[in-house]
């Protein structure tokens, strides 16, 4: 369902300013006048769902849970703060990120990028590329495909990029999100939508 966010066309000057802020390795990201945008800050009491097309938010975004569909992209020119983020599509943050649980699943063809300071409780990656250009700290990262680009001095309390043994999975995640001694990312997403944590 299309949200009731007040949208307008991105101006040429705004598009040029955003393009100038793109890191060199984000050469695939191009901004054009006329794309849909909205003025920030954007604060949603509950879920923010980006179902299709591209939406540029010229400011900060704050919500409980953010979902970006696989045929959509969200660009946040400011900071992004959410309890949970489920990124099937493209999601780019030009400010800081503060998120309890961040999940990316897109079969490797979509990107989550952040240029500022990223503070993530739990990052779960299932064939989704993450590119953290600024600083990064997390309590736990649990990647499936290791499509995670981190800055040199990233701080991670529990780093499972080398994989998780069955015992580690059971000690870390609740039973409801495990299936045959593996992490079931779809069940993680269902738990997040229900307002539950996938962690013990």
Image: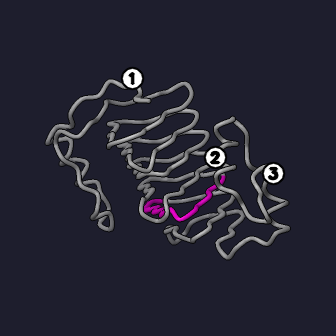
Quick one: 164 or 185, which is closer to the camera?
A: 185
Asked whether the residues under the numbered discs 1 and 2 touch, taking CB atoms below 8 Å apart as contact, a structural biologist would say no
Question: Mark on residue 189?
Answer: 2
Marks 3 and 1 sit apart, C-alpha to C-alpha, by: 35 Å
Toward which corner of the image does residue 162 lie, by quadrant? bottom right
> Taking 27 as reference, is 119 left or right?
right
- Does 148 lie within the magenta span? no
How packed is label 1: few (under 14 Cα within 10 Å), some, or many (20 or more)? few
Sooner in the amino-acid sequence: mark 2 or mark 3: 3
Toward which corner of the image does residue 21 lie, by quadrant? bottom left
How packed is label 3: few (under 14 Cα within 10 Å), some, or many (20 or more)? some
Sooner in the amino-acid sequence: mark 3 or mark 1: 1
> Taking 143 as reference, is 129 left or right?
left
Residue with the mark numbered 3: 174
Sooner in the amino-acid sequence: mark 1 or mark 2: 1
Q: What residue appears at the point 60 percent right and 58 percent down from the top-left corner?
A: 137
Marks 1 and 2 sit apart, C-alpha to C-alpha, by: 24 Å
Region of the chain picked out in magenta, as a range: 122-134
> Taking 138 as reference, is 20 left or right?
left
Q: What residue appears at the point 85 percent right and 60 percent down from the top-left corner?
A: 171
Marks 2 and 3 sit apart, C-alpha to C-alpha, by: 13 Å
Image coordinates for residue 140, horizontal then vertical, percent: 68, 59
Quick one: 62 or 195, which is closer to the camera?
A: 195
Residue with the mark numbered 1: 4
- Does 129 lie within the magenta span? yes
């Amino acid at each position: 369902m299309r949200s009731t966010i007040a949208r307008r066309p991105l101006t040429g000057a705004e598009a040029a300013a955003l393009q100038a802020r793109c890191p060199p390795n984000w050469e695939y990201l191009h901004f054009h006048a006329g794309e849909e945008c909205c003025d920030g800050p954007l604060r949603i009491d509950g879920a923010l769902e980006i179902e299709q097309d591209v939406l540029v938010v010229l400011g900060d975004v704050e919500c409980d849970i953010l979902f970006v569909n696989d045929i959509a992209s969200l660009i946040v020119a400011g900071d992004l703060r959410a309890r949970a983020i489920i990124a099937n599509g493209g999601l780019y943050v030009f400010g800081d990120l503060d998120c309890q649980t961040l999940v990316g699943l897109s079969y490797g063809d979509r990107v989550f990028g952040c240029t500022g300071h990223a503070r993530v409780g739990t990052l779960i990656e299932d064939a989704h590329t993450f590119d953290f250009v600024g600083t990064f700290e997390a309590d736990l990262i649990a990647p499936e495909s290791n499509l995670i680009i981190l800055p040199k001095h990233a701080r991670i309390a529990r780093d499972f990029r080398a994989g998780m043994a069955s015992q580690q999975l059971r000690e870390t995640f609740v039973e409801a999100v495990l299936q045959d001694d593996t992490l079931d990312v779809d069940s993680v997403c269902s738990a997040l939508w229900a307002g539950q944590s996938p962690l013990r």
